[in-house]
C-alpha cells in the first residue's frame, strides 16, 4: 500500500543504518523471541515488520519455513544479504503490518521483534497478527516498554517531533501488557508476559548514545532533520538526549533497556 503516511514511514526506516543498530545493540533479542515461541523445523513462521531479519534469520536457522515481511524494501534488501552470509533460507516480502498480503490462518507462528509496535494504528496491526495465525498457533512479540529506555526516548523526542496522524497511538504502548491484551482480546488464550531487560554496553562516552542514534536510528534522524536550520533547537535536543542517557547509564557506562516479551495462542474459535 502506498499512501503519504506509508511513504513517510518507509523513508524514516530507510534512513540511517538500522542494520547496524540491530546488530550492535539488540542481536540477542531475535533468538530470545524464537526460543520463547518454540520455533523449530517445519513450522510456517511469519515475521511482521522484520526489519533486516533480527528474528527471522534465527527462526529460519532452526529449520522453520520463514517469511520475513516489512514495509521498507531497503531493509529487506539488507536482510537478504545478511541471510545469505549465514546460509539462512527464507522468503522476503514487502508488506504493511496493518494490511498483510497473506491468507487467513496461513502461519503456525506469527512474530515481531520491536517491529509491529511502530505501526501507527495498533488495533489494525493486532488484527492482522491474529488473522494470519492459524487457530492454535503462536503469536510472539518483543516490544519496548513505555517506562524503559526506548519508551522514554520517544517521550523525549515527542516535543521536538512532528505531530502524529489522527488516531495514531504511541509505539511504546505495545510494551504495556494490558494494552496488548486488550488489542488481542478473546482472539488469543494462554497469554504469557514477562518484562525483561537487554544489557547495552555500546555507549561508554557520555554523549555516545546521542551521537550513535543521531546518525543511525531513523526516528531520531527524522526529528533532527526537522530542526536542521535551527541551531538552538538542535542544541536543546542534544541536551535532552544526553540527559536521558545519563538517567539510564550505570557507573560503568552500561544500560539496561526494558522490553516486554509476550506470547499467546490463537483461539481455536
Image: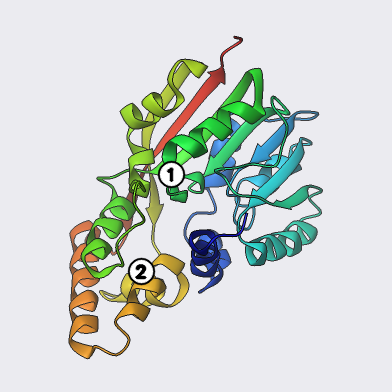
Residue 253 spot, x, y in % from top left: 29, 64
Compared with 107, 83 (above or below) is below
Q: Secondary structure at mark 1?
A: loop
Residue with the mark numbered 1: 121
Query: In the current view of this chain or complex, which residue is farthest to the top?
Result: 269
Q: Answer yes or no: do the residues labelled 2 and 1 have beta carbons within 8 Å? A: no
Examine the image and state in which quarter residue 123 appears.
top left
Examine the image and state in which quarter residue 81 appears.
bottom right
Q: Secondary structure at mark 2?
A: loop
Residue drawn where x is 30% and y is 58% of the image: 154
Local crowd size for mark 1, using a 10 Å CA cut-off: few (<14), some (14–19), many (≥20): some
Residue 61 spot, x, y in % from top left: 75, 43
Local crowd size for mark 2, using a 10 Å CA cut-off: few (<14), some (14–19), many (≥20): some
Residue drawn where x is 61% and y is 10% of the image: 268
Q: Is residue 151 visible?
A: yes
Judge depth for marks 2 and 1 and give the one in front: 1
Q: How far, Cα to Cα, is label 2 from label 1?
A: 33 Å
Comparing 235 with 212, the one in front is 235
Comparing 217 with 123, the one in front is 123
Residue 13 spot, x, y in % from top left: 52, 65
Residue with the mark numbered 2: 203
Is residue 129 left or right of 57 when viewed as pictured? left
Residue drawn where x is 78% and y is 47% of the image: 90
| Lower position in the chain sequence, tag 2 or tag 1 | 1
Q: Is residue 204 visible?
A: no
Q: Quadrant of the C terminus?
A: top right
Comparing 171 with 245, the one in front is 171
Compared with 192, 128 (above or below) is below
Q: Which mark is residue 244?
A: none
Amino acid at each position: 500500500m502506498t499512501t503519504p503516511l506509508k511513504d513517510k514511514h518507509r523513508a524514516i526506516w530507510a534512513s540511517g543504518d538500522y542494520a547496524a543498530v540491530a546488530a550492535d545493540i539488540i542481536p540477542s533479542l531475535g533468538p530470545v523471541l524464537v526460543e520463547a515461541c518454540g520455533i523449530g523445523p517445519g513450522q510456517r513462521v511469519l515475521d511482521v515488520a522484520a526489519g533486516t531479519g533480527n528474528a527471522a534469520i534465527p527462526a529460519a536457522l532452526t529449520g522453520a519455513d520463514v517469511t520475513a515481511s516489512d514495509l521498507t524494501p531497503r531493509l529487506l534488501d539488507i536482510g537478504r544479504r545478511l541471510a545469505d552470509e549465514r546460509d539462512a533460507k527464507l522468503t522476503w516480502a514487502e508488506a504493511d503490518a496493518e494490511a498483510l498480503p497473506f491468507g487467513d490462518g496461513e502461519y503456525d507462528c506469527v512474530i515481531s521483534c520491536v517491529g509491529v509496535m511502530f505501526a501507527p494504528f495498533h488495533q489494525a496491526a493486532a488484527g492482522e497478527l491474529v488473522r494470519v495465525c492459524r487457530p492454535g498457533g503462536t503469536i510472539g512479540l518483543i516490544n519496548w516498554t513505555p517506562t524503559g529506555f526506548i519508551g522514554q526516548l520517544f517521550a523525549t523526542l515527542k516535543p521536538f517531533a512532528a505531530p502524529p496522524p489522527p488516531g495514531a497511538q504511541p509505539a511504546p504502548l505495545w510494551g504495556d501488557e494490558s494494552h496488548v491484551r486488550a488489542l488481542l482480546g478473546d482472539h488469543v488464550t494462554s497469554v504469557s508476559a514477562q518484562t525483561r531487560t537487554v544489557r547495552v554496553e555500546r555507549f561508554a562516552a557520555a554523549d555516545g548514545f546521542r551521537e550513535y542514534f543521531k546518525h543511525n536510528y531513523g526516528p531520531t534522524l527524522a526529528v533532527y532533520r526537522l530542526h536542521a536550520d535551527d541551531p538552538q533547537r538542535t542544541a536543546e535536543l542534544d541536551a535532552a538526549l544526553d540527559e536521558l542517557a545519563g538517567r539510564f547509564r550505570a557507573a560503568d557506562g552500561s544500560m539496561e533497556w526494558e522490553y516486554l516479551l509476550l506470547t499467546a495462542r490463537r483461539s481455536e474459535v
